[in-house]
Image: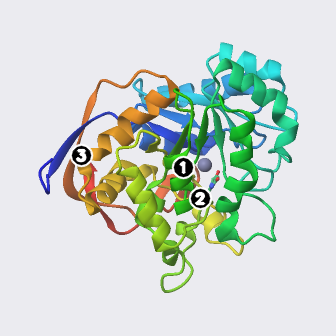
Amino acid sequence: MSNSPTQIQLIQPDDWHLHIRDGEVMKDVLADTARQFARAIIMPNLKPPVTTVALANAYRTRIEANLKLLGIDSFTPLMTLYLTDNTSADEVRKAKAEGIAAFKLYPAGATTNSDEGVSDIQRCYQALEAMQAVGMPLLVHGEVTSTEIDIFDREAVFIDQVLDPLRKDFPGLKIVFEHITTKQAAHYVRDAVTGEKNTIAATITPQHLLLNRNAIFAGGIRPHNYCLPVLKREEHRVALLEAATSGNPRFFLGTDSAPHAKGAKEAACGCAGCYSAFNALGLYAEAFESVNQLDKLEGFASLFGPDFYSLPRNTKKITLRKQAQAVPTELPLGDATIVPLRAGETIAWTLV
Ligand code: DOR
Ligand code: ZN
């Protein structure tokens, strides 16, 4: 690709990690995602969590109803189930038979609505055995939850204490290390030895490619830049950008766009989550352009995700133009509002 293109064409991307919530607010956030992406992996951390195939099917029906209200017929939600200490091997086999895309492991207490998550991974071994047997991917929120471990170290410690032992016990289990934030995670995934069939991948968010932890404290506390796993030092951002733009198919796009109303973020104990769905592709294009690797964006955004999930690649094309797009200071979110990532500023790339 030429040094500084002003327009790029890509196969339409998918978002391999997304929160769209439920009820009144869903329609507002779904519209932003469906404008850009063909499919998205829908996170199951509702209240109560989506722990069974029946709950996932009901959630899918509510999503489809909202898509219909929006007049959108070009977007497919890929449903996931929330793993608990009690998930049975039968539920895993049923999920596979009914087209559930993956299970999500939240260590209990790690993040938003994770209280019913896994208290000890050993309790899930029968379910994991079944996932390995049927080829059901496990999506992992990779942080230990012990409050004695420094919050900036929880991902790196998770690799040693949980992820690596898990991969040794289940070498055939497909794992996506979600929203990685550290050099350790990027290198772990890059260097992992697998059998002939690759079994490990990682998603990376736009905020972790564009921001380091200073962004949470720039001139005062910035709750809209707070998410989990929390932003890390610059050396980690650089390692993530290197991984994302390396052309290695183990790294692909997952925004982790996680809407919370303005009031829930700007609070004494504000919720974790960045709302990046408004112009996520523009943000990713900025990140790739910053290291002159725009030609690597299509693999990361549109090809490696479906390949890992053994789903067909999209065929439609989209165009991104280098044209600054203003980001509103607030967007509607049901009866409330939400402050998107980059609010009140501009994003250098716009979806045509
Ligand atoms: O920042 C986050 N927000 N990280 C997560 O893992 C969950 C998400 C949410 O659901 O709000
Ligand atoms: Zn998430």
Which quadrant of the frame does ligand 1 lie within?
bottom right
Q: Amino acid at mark 3?
A: Asp
Residue at 50% over, 39% down: 16
Q: Is residue 181 left or right of residue 341?
A: right
Q: Amino acid at mark 2?
A: Gly
The answer to whether mark 1 is within 8 Å of ligand 2 is: yes
- Residue 157 percent across, percent down from the top left: 70, 61
- Residue 273 percent across, percent down from the top left: 59, 58
Q: Is residue 290 left or right of residue 279?
A: left
CA distance for labels 2 and 3: 29 Å
Q: Amino acid at mark 1?
A: Asp
CA distance for labels 1 and 2: 8 Å
CA distance for labels 1 and 3: 23 Å
Q: Classify 18 as above or below 143.
A: above
Observer able to see residue 22: no
In this figure, which residue is indicated by the disc labeled 3? 295
Camera-nearest label, 2 or 3: 3
Q: Decide which of tag 2 and tag 3 comes sooner along the chain.
A: 2
Displayed quadrant of residue 267: bottom right
In the structure shown, which secondary structural element does the residue marked by tag 1 occupy?
A: loop
Q: Is residue 212 left or right of residue 129?
A: left
In this figure, which residue is indicated by the disc labeled 2? 273
In this figure, which residue is indicated by the disc labeled 1? 256
> Counting other residues with Cα less than 10 Å from the Cα at mark 3, is it few (<14), some (14-19), or many (20 or more)?
many
Displayed quadrant of residue 252: top left
In the structure shown, which secondary structural element does the residue marked by tag 3 occupy?
A: helix
